[in-house]
Image (cartoon, helix red, strand yellow):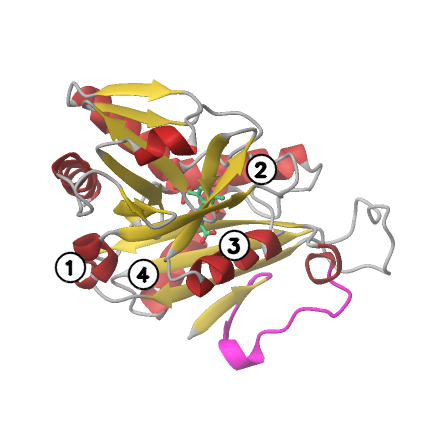
Amino acid sequence: RTVYVNGEYLPEDQAKVSVFDRGFLFADAVYEVTSVLDGKLISFPGHAARLQRSLTELEMASPVSDAELLEIHRELITRNDLTEGLIYLQVTRGAADRDFLYPAPETVPTLVLFTQAKPALEHSPMVQTGMKIVTIPDRRWGRRDIKTTQLLYPSMGKMEARARGADDAWMVEDGAVTEGTSNNAYIIKDGVIVTRHLGEEILHGITRKAVLAFAREAQMKVEERPFTVEEALSADEAFITSASSFVTPVVSIDGADIGTGRPGKVVARLREIYLDEMR
Ligand code: PDD
């Protein structure tokens, strides 16, 4: 693979970042994951805007303009012959002596991007079978709207899900589902799509925004509010969204079936609408 590091395109084994990088030492870093479908970048403007917002919230300088960022994404797609997969991007506050205080403003940020190929969509087994979810307490920090690389808790959550025979975890706070470990969470009851409202408790998903807009255009009802695990258990259907999974059905929570226990029609339709609009 050819990867990008601070202005250079390099073979992956020649790309290097300092051991003093604050991304490494403090998780002082933000990231984005943008999907590539049929060689095309999906929702780039949304990802670029969210990146700028994350940087602003953390008082981090932006290493490149949106136009330059788009150019780097395109270059990586070309150089790696990427047709289906993802582009991962990370910006850190740069390398400096280890200190809890931020380094001098002139410290050069680190910008890294790489591609990750993935098999064509039709072969995604989760879409056919649906995902099994377990619930866990949400023990992340309070600014989940900033896309930082502090991913240890979500990583632990996925490990726990795996250990409990499931595919992923939904996190619960004050009795309500916040989101999945790396995706937004939804239920459908009597035709109404319910997903948590935007705030500091969840990441403002780019896929979420597009899917809700398409659902409303298709005259589906949407409620943006917290929902409980009990509500989820009595829902007709459930699903998740993210750049890496698009729209993927959820068929059980904590071992109990949702609806029929099989991927439902409304979710299938949403996935189809989303992919049709994006392709
Ligand atoms: N995760 N919520 C969380 C906690 C996430 O990490 C993500 C994305 C989402 C969905 O956002 P979007 O639709 O913009 O991808 C929601 C990426 C894919 C990841 O960490 O790999």
Residue 45 visible within the image: no
Q: Is residue 157 visible?
A: yes
- Which of 109 and 37 lies nearest the eye of the viewer? 37
Task: Specify the label residue 70 is tagged with.
Answer: none
Q: CA distance from mark 2 to mark 1?
A: 31 Å
Q: Nearer the viewer, mark 3 or mark 2?
A: 3
Mark 3 or mark 4, whichever is nearer to me: 3
Crowd around label 4: few <14 · some 14–19 · many ≥20 (10 Å): many
Q: Nearer the viewer, residue 121 or 54?
A: 121
For marks 1 and 4, give the one nearer the viewer.
1
Q: Where in the figure is residue 3, as x and y percent of width and height?
A: 48, 69
User: Separation of disc 3 and disc 1 at Cα?
Assistant: 27 Å
Residue 77 is drawn in which quadrant? Answer: bottom left
Q: Say above or below: 20 vs 58.
A: below
Looking at marks 3 and 1 on the same chain, the residue that comes earlier in the sequence is marked by: 1
Q: Is residue 14 magenta?
A: yes
Q: Which element type, helix, strand or loop, lies under badge 3?
A: helix
Q: Helix, strand, or loop for circle 2?
A: loop
Q: Which of pointers 2 and 4 lies earlier in the amino acid sequence?
A: 4
The kind of residue tagged 1 is Glu
Residue occupied by mark 1: 122
Region rendered in magenta: 6-21
* Residue type (three-letter) at the residue carrying disc 2: Arg
Q: Relative to 232, is 163 on the left or the right?
A: right
Residue receiving disc 3: 157
